[in-house]
Amino acid sequence: MTEDRMALTELLQKSGDGDFLRSVAEAVLQILMEADVEGLIGAGRHERTGDRLNYRNGYRDRSLDTRLGSLQLRIPKLRQGSYFPPFLEPRKTAEKALVAVIQEAWIGGVSTRRVDELVQAMGLAGISKSQVSKLCKDIDERVNAFLDRPIEGEWRYLWLDATYLKVRDGGRIVSVAAIIAVAVNTEGRREIVGLGIGPSEAEPFWSSFIKGLVKRGLRGVKLVISDAHDGLRLAITRVLGATWQRCRVHWMRNALAHVQKGQHTMVAAAIRQAFLQTNADAAHETWRHVADQLRPRWPKLAALMDDSEHDVLAYMTFPNQHRTKLHSTNPLERLNKEVKRRADVVGIFPNEASITRLIGAVLLEQNDEWLLQCRYMQIEGMAELTPPLIDADPAKLPPMAA
């Protein structure tokens, strides 16, 4: 420890006034790491003792961004196992992706003032294009492997939702849709199964996205839950042959747009009577009764209820224990908020590849968390959606045609 103090004193004497605090911080953190490693090894540097448990194996460089600037640290390596300083946190994929997107935007000269300020605050101004390219390549390999992985097993429910982001395209700023797909399998577990970036919500885009999921192995889907995106319903019918559930929350907002603000509470309470029913027949009967009651005063609202009855109440024909999570895209709300939080830091993306990089990294980390959690849906209800197996008793099989 005396040698460490002497080294620290010499370092401070050599440091200029401008680098004084940064040099102090670097020296102190280096001393802490050396002492920590010494305790793990059971011996000091070059010390011969029978209590030694391991050996040093050089160093690896790591920068630490602080309010004092970027600190350059040398993290000790061990011959067996690894060492990571407790005062540092491993950089998550999503954090790396965010840094990469900010760097890419700044180097490309297409960043906004907000990105410029972030670059300066994070101490990234001196980074080169080659460094950004290497970082992006590492992240892209992980994200693409996740997004292109095979989809195994059977999946009964599929949620689709779109988040709109701004991206530069040929000198213009355009809005693109980032489509996120979440599915639940027959074991009641949910996973993020897809991400698509598209310029519009026309039927060809939706069909192409869903066909991509099917090509990767998505099968057995009984219900698709989404908002009323243009062309989506037709794509679901053509590609999946599944039932479509229109998001009840978004539908209610559209319905109340036909009613004076002071009457929202009363009208919403009347419509919700249909949602409180225990079976599909009662729900449809109540729905039509409420529509007839509202028709004289709000004919447009009644017409909307007539047209969308089967789409809004589609979930009522599915297992009762699953219905609370099937009637809307609310299960994706927390995920979408996290996506928007990360995207808002960038503001305007430099290209579509950077959107896939950042959003894909966020989805990858969220999916890992879901895999460690309990089942999202009760497995008992899944049995109601599984067709019974054909009895293999030869005596009960129909005779073969001659």
Image (tube, grey):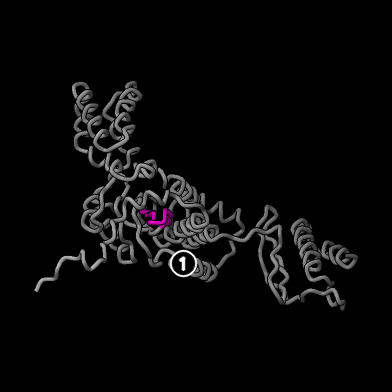
Taking the magenta stretch, the answer to whether it contains residue 220 is no
Residue 172: percent from left, percent from top: 35, 54
Query: Left or right of 102: which side holds 59?
Result: right
Query: Left or right of 113: which side holds 377?
Result: left
Q: What residue is drawn where x is 51% and y is 60%?
A: 97
State the extent of the magenta-drawn residues as a range: 176-192
Q: Is residue 156 above or below residue 40?
A: above
Q: From the viewer's side, name the closer residue of 9 and 145.
A: 145
Q: From the viewer's side, name the closer residue of 201 and 146.
A: 146
Q: What residue is drawn where x is 25% and y is 48%?
A: 230
Disc 1 packing (10 Å; few <14; some 14–19; many ≥20): many
* Residue designated by label 1: 140
Residue 340: percent from left, percent from top: 45, 48
Q: Is residue 273 above or below residue 369?
A: above
Residue 344: percent from left, percent from top: 47, 48
The number of callouts visible is 1
Q: Quadrant of residue 189?
A: bottom left
The three-letter amino acid code for the residue at tag 1 is Asp
The quarter of the picture where the N terminus appears is: bottom right
| One can see residue 275 in this view | yes
User: Residue extending furthest left?
Assistant: 402
Q: Quadrant of residue 285?
A: top left
User: Residue extending furthest right?
Assistant: 2
Could you tell me which secondary element the residue under label 1 belongs to? helix
The quarter of the picture where the C terminus appears is: bottom left
Q: What residue is drawn where x is 57% and y is 65%?
A: 127
Query: Left or right of 107: which side holds 168?
Result: left
Residue 258: percent from left, percent from top: 26, 29
